[in-house]
Image (cartoon, rainbow, N blue to C red):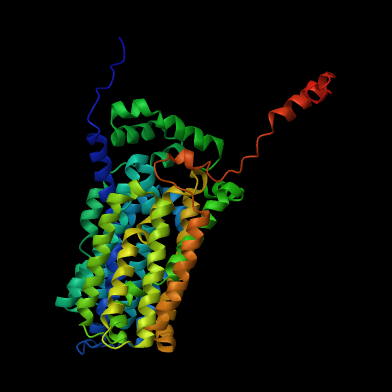
């Protein structure tokens, strides 16, 4: 009796399966977008006389910057949780508590419980932010990564826009309560997605890894690709079953360099002002003194970010990560500089220019600066250090978020909105330089191929040197050098 050859199937079959998994996994970033945009309700909370507590401007700074503060305390531990529990199981475990934290915020009788709900909610968001992109990259084929790995940023943009729209029509309590609704369906859908094949192989669960790959690729494509053998080989070459193993692997230069590069990209990206633009949006437009309703400007920002991120998913694989990120960083730098200069110069009848500059900044962010670093978070760290690399990256990401979230109101009071935009322009220009000179292209490559990108190969010795060395060993004279 011979083994039956798997029947060929349409290429759309594996793509549809991977797209469905990517949609569920990326859906975990929708609550992250809700959390990012939630500070837009704070002006309404401050003016609500029906509450038994008052929210000061200092409370606003702490509530906005709480995401970075919690991330600094917890993100380095998330890699350990991912390795001990598995990324898919950890994803399931954090979704349901998110409901409790958001409802605590919505129906809080005191300022203390408001802080408890907010801190718990951003803890869930930090865990989701750390685990989703590495899990997504390990579930997808290289040809589908550019398209489907944009989904997390699309979900974040959608979450931000939804909060902006809801805050324009509803009370802060209603908006906050509605932010709890996505968690239950996400939990139910997460029950059907497979675990990361890489994590299963690290745990010695080879048959489970094979079943996961067959589920994702289809039997025929799985048999052709020999992907499981590549995964096993890449893991056997470098011990990585525990966080201790991964920390030892991180000492190797070709493992440390991509993680360090990713840290620089994320820190410069945050210092470039995106967190301030999307969390202090309403305050920013109110302070800028534009002759347009601040809430209208806020909604325009949300729509622009979503549309640009959707467009990014269509072009990213065709253009390439490096060139796309370089170009959009440069546009962000120019837009912030132009907007800041016009605000500082107070040019007559040109109040529309800063608004246009901010919208161009947001469009460029959505096209490349927003989604690409998250894709790189899954692609760039080598397999032996992917979990610990994600934790380190999101730790520094959280530090920079906290700095920007807490300092931005002070920066606005000292330098104004125009001066703040000029500061953001400088950091976006620095990010452009770093990406151009140091980031390799990662699109279209298997993860085991990307592990070799930062390995410095010694230059090959010229053939003449090899011949001379061989001649010297056997005593034969060098004919090439004879007169």
125 or 328, nearer to the observer? 328
Q: Residue furthest left?
A: 169
The residue located at (31%, 58%) in the rendering is 153
Q: Is residue 191 visible?
A: yes
User: Could you tell me residue 70's position as x and y percent?
Assistant: 42, 69
The residue located at (56%, 39%) in the rendering is 238
Q: Is residue 84 visible?
A: no
Residue 106: quarter of image: bottom left
User: Could you tell me residue 405's position as x and y percent?
Assistant: 40, 76
Image side of residue 466 versus residue 41, left or right: right
Residue 10: quarter of image: top left
Q: Residue furthest front?
A: 483
User: Could you tell me residue 185's position as x and y percent?
Assistant: 20, 55
382 or 119, nearer to the observer? 382
Image side of residue 256 versus residue 328, left or right: right
Quarter holding the C terminus is top right
**Against 382, is 13 above or below?**
above
């Amino acid at each position: 009796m011979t083994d039956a050859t798997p029947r060929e199937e349409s290429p759309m079959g594996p793509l549809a399966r991977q797209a469905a998994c990517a949609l569920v996994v990326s859906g975990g970033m929708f609550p992250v977008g809700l959390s990012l945009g939630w500070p837009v309700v704070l002006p309404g909370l401050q003016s609500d006389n029906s509450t038994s507590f008052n929210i000061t401007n200092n409370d606003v700074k702490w509530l906005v910057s709480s995401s970075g503060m919690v991330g600094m305390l917890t993100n380095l531990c998330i890699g350990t949780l991912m390795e001990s529990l598995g990324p898919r199981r950890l994803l399931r475990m954090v979704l349901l508590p998110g409901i409790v934290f958001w409802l605590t915020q919505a129906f809080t009788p005191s300022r203390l419980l408001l802080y408890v709900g907010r801190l718990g909610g951003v803890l869930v968001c930090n865990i989701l932010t750390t685990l989703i992109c590495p899990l997504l990259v390990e579930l997808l084929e290289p040809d589908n990564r550019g398209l489907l790995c944009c989904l997390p940023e699309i979900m974040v943009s959608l979450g931000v826009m939804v909060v902006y729209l809801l805050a324009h029509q509803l009370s802060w309590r209603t908006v906050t309560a509605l932010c709890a609704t996505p968690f239950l369906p996400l939990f139910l859908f997460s029950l059907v997605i497979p675990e990361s094949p890489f994590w299963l192989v690290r745990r010695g669960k080879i048959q489970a890894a094979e079943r996961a790959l067959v589920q994702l690729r289809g039997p025929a494509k799985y048999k052709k690709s020999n992907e499981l053998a590549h995964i096993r080989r890449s893991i056997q070459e470098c011990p990585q079953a525990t966080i201790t193993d991964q920390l030892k692997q991180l000492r190797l230069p070709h493992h440390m360099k991509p993680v360090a590069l990713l840290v620089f990209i994320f820190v410069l990206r945050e210092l470039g002002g995106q967190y301030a633009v999307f969390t202090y949006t309403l305050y920013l437009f109110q302070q800028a003194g534009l002759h347009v309703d601040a809430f209208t400007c806020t909604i325009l920002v949300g729509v622009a970010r979503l549309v640009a991120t959707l467009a990014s998913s269509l072009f990213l694989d065709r253009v390439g990560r490096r060139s796309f990120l370089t170009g959009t960083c440069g546009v962000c730098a120019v837009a912030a500089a132009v907007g800041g200069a016009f605000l500082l110069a107070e040019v007559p009848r040109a109040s529309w220019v800063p608004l246009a500059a901010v919208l161009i900044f947001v469009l460029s962010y959505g096209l490349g600066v927003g989604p690409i670093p998250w894709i790189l978070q899954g692609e760039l760290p080598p397999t032996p250090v992917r979990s610990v690399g994600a934790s380190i990256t999101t730790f520094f990401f959280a530090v920079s978020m906290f700095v920007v979230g807490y300092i931005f109101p002070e920066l606005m009071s000292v330098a104004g909105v125009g001066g703040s935009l000029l500061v953001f322009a400088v950091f976006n220009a620095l990010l452009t330089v770093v990406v151009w000179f140091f980031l390799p292209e990662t699109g279209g490559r298997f993860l085991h191929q990307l592990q070799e990108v930062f390995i410095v190969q010694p230059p090959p010795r010229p053939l003449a040197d090899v011949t001379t060395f061989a001649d010297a060993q056997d005593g034969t004279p060098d004919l090439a050098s004879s007169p």
